[in-house]
Image (cartoon, rainbow, N blue to C red):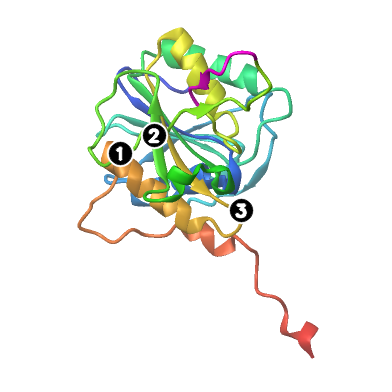
């Protein structure tokens, strides 16, 4: 799917946002692109039939692109990072095709790990999850993580729906493709780590920053002596102010 543009990425870590509640993963990638040290370079646009196709003016000024499209790829060779940014959504019923194509390419390119950044509905938390950190991780392999990382808790299946009261290993409501891409990675024996934040719909820019700082504990993406910069594109998150004439 990406062979013609992305070469020489053996051993790279791939960052991918899951289109999920509050678009937190995509906001997180914006923060990473703005604060990555050294700065990433634009690599290519990706056209995939599973994505809702969009095009607009460049919203990441200075990174080498002239347009923003549904899926763009940036790279940082110093830190061996590939950063995927999805700026639209996945068409209904097309998630499985997208996951399969992406994992096929990931394996063929011999990348070292995929880190998926997503979110989950805050109102679906258990009583134990309401207290403490709203951040969770889970992985398809035995990955070393910082001591403060909390693994996503297992959830019991809803009583009465099945005969055996077994636990479902993952429950990610509002997480988009997060659960499916994790399960597919386990089946294919690929190294994937999922980072999540519990959140609600609204202005989720703070959630994006928090998730980016969580990622930074796992994979260094910024100069920690500098204050986190907000992406310039965020000034247009909610459009221009309401015209004063409407209040006259």
Element type where label 3 sits in the image? loop
Quarter holding the N terminus is top right
**The stretch drawn in magenta includes residue 208:** no
Decide which of 34, 98 is in the foreground and name it: 98
Is residue 219 something one can see in this rendering? no
Q: Residue at x 42, y 33 (%)?
A: 152
Q: Position of residue 71 (x, y in %)?
A: 57, 34
Report, in whole angstroms, how far the alpha carbon at label 2 lies from the one at label 1. 7 Å
Q: Residue furthest bottom?
A: 248
Does the CB distance between marks 2 and 3 fall below 8 Å? no
Q: Hey, which quadrant is residue 163 in on the image? A: top right
Q: Hey, which quadrant is residue 149 in on the image? A: top left
Does the CB distance between marks 2 and 1 fall below 8 Å? yes
Report, in whole angstroms, how far the alpha carbon at label 2 lies from the one at label 3. 21 Å
Q: Main structural element of the magenta stretch: helix, strand or loop?
A: loop
Is residue 147 something one can see in this rendering? yes
Element type where label 1 sits in the image? loop
Decide which of 175, 38 is in the foreground and name it: 175
Mark 1, residue position: 149
Crowdedness near tag 2: few (<14), some (14–19) or many (≥20) residues, C-alpha within 10 Å: some
Report, in whole angstroms, how far the alpha carbon at label 1 lies from the one at label 3. 24 Å
Marking on residue 177: none
Q: Position of residue 176 (x, y in %)?
A: 60, 33
Highlighted range, magenta: 163-170
Marking on residue 137: 2
Is 58 drawn above or below residue 240 in the view shown?
above
Give the mark nearest the N terminus, 2 or 1.
2
Q: Position of residue 134 (x, y in %)?
A: 42, 48
Mark 3, residue position: 201
Q: Residue at x 48, y 45 (%)?
A: 127
């Amino acid at each position: 799917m990406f062979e013609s543009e992305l070469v020489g990425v053996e051993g790279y870590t791939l960052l991918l946002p899951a289109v999920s509640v509050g678009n937190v993963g995509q906001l997180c990638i914006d923060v990473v692109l703005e604060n990555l040290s050294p700065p990433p370079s634009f690599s290519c646009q990706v056209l995939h039939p599973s994505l809702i196709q969009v095009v607009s003016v460049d919203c990441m000024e200075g990174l080498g692109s002239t347009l923003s499209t549904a899926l763009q790829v940036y790279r940082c060779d110093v830190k061996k990072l590939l950063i995927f940014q999805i700026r639209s959504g996945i068409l209904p019923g097309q998630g499985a095709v997208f996951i399969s194509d992406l994992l096929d390419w990931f394996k063929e390119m011999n990348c070292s790990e995929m880190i998926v950044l997503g979110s989950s509905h805050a109102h679906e938390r258990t009583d134990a999850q309401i207290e403490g950190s709203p951040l969770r991780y889970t992985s398809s392999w035995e990955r070393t993580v910082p001591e403060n990382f909390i693994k996503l808790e297992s959830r019991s299946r809803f009583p009465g729906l099945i005969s055996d009261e077994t636990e479902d290993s993952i429950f990610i409501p509002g997480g988009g493709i997060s659960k499916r891409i994790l399960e597919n990675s386990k089946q294919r024996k690929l190294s994937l780590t999922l980072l999540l934040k519990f959140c609600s719909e609204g202005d989720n820019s703070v959630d994006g920053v928090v998730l980016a700082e969580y990622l930074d504990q796992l994979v260094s993406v910024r100069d920690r002596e500098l204050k986190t910069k907000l992406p310039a594109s965020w000034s247009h998150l909610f459009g221009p102010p309401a015209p004063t004439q409407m209040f006259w």
